[in-house]
Image (cartoon, rainbow, N blue to C red):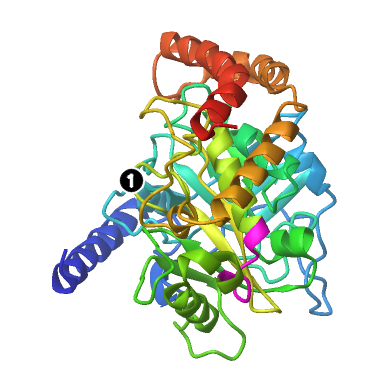
Amino acid sequence: MTTRSASSLRFVATMLGCWCILAACSSDAPAPAVRAPARGGEDVVAAPPPVVEAASSQGEKDGSPPSDAAAPRDEVYDPDKVPSFELELEPAAIALLSDPLQDKKTWVHGRFKFGAVTFADVGVRRKGGTTYRVLPDKASLKVKFNKWVKGQKLNGLEELTLNNMVSDPTRLSERLAYHVFRAMGLPAQKANTAHLSINGEDYGIYANVETPDENFLARVFGNRVRTLYEVVWGSSWMPGDTGYEIDIGAPGAPAGTMPDIDLLSAAVAASKDETLLADFAPRLHVRQWLRHSATEAVTGHHDGYAYGFWESHNYFMAGDVDGKFSLVPWSTDLSFSDSDGVPDAANPRSDTALARCTKSACWNEYKIEVQSVLSTYETLDLVNLATKWHDQIDPLVRSDPKGAGSLALYEETTAKLYAWLAARPSVIRAQLGL
């Protein structure tokens, strides 16, 4: 699509969105929303917050920022629980989130409730690529607690990421994958299954995934990370790649620039196959890169960095104080399945740096990491864990009014999942000759 065409579509979408918002307003409704200037690539719908009772984390009279709500982070992501989240949205917000022509990164105001915790004003927007949906369908959502109220957090959490799982009939793959990445000692998100209602309507269950943000980075890296980029399109780490989105930019760098990515790209471009690891080492945590890739292979994550069937994407790159990058997994809903073909651990994508690794002693180091990952994998008892989590969510899947796919498909793919988990180590060893 040309820039001119994209701009024209954005203009039409904006006009239609404004018409929808205005049409939703009546004489006793809130004032219509108005578009505020975009910031960081995200449109904003500024609207009066809904009139509700005082929330538990409203700012104090002296003007200090609100304190965190008393809901432990572990309670939000406890794998033994299915947390229930409630959203209340005004008609104008519903109209916008139901409009497929509106930018999915447009935020609206809403009210959030989790147990005894109520926030009177949070930001809500849609998300997703091929899984993107609009209301009243099962839309994937971001809920940002401090979008409109500075300092508002859910015990340290600034944001929820709720994924609709429409690509995963088992409803287990995403959280299982993050569990395995964490078990390998890699920086990865906490995750469980959550239940969501919007304006009292049951929206069923979602994958509740910890958001990669400053709080996540502090938890897994301490205070060492300075930048964070999401790789949303294919990236070979070569100069000129444009598949990055800046989540946290380099301190002091001009807006839109990625100086540490540029240094990594220069190192990759100048590297030689026979000295690949040494050449990458000043700009990349090479052992972590190899282990991340090995974990993608073992989990069959065929929509990520190393073995993506379509392109190398769906991961984050965290740059630290030493100028080195670590990889963080993302969008793991196509793991643990051969539905799109059998991921081959011996053949990483040809446009990745890992493909160059196959040509030298680097590949022996990679195989060592794969063997280490397999050794840990075999201690995790994933079949029993998947069975436990299946039993936890099974009644909710069967009663989900917005669930994708038939119950017959759900049952069939769940049975295949158990077999896949059990067989995977032998499959990987055969592929790599281990």
What residue do we see at 66% from left, 44% from top?
Answer: 368
How many residues crowd mark 1 within 10 Å: few (<14), some (14–19), many (20+)?
A: few
Between 38 and 86, the one lying in front of the other is: 38
Position of residue 411 measured from the top left corner of the image (x, y, whole percent): 50, 10
Q: Quadrant of the C terminus?
A: top right
Residue 374 placement: quadrant: top right
Decide which of 23, 385 is in the foreground and name it: 385
Can residue 87 be seen from the camera position used here?
no
Q: Which residue is mark 1?
A: 310
**Main secondary structure found in the magenta portion:** loop
Report the side of 184 relative to 203 (left or right). right
Region in magenta: 280-287
Q: Is residue 32 left or right of residue 416?
A: left
Residue that appears at 46% across and 34% down = 334
| Residue placed most toward the observer, 298 or 335 | 298
Q: Picture coordinates of residue 217 (x, y %)?
A: 71, 63
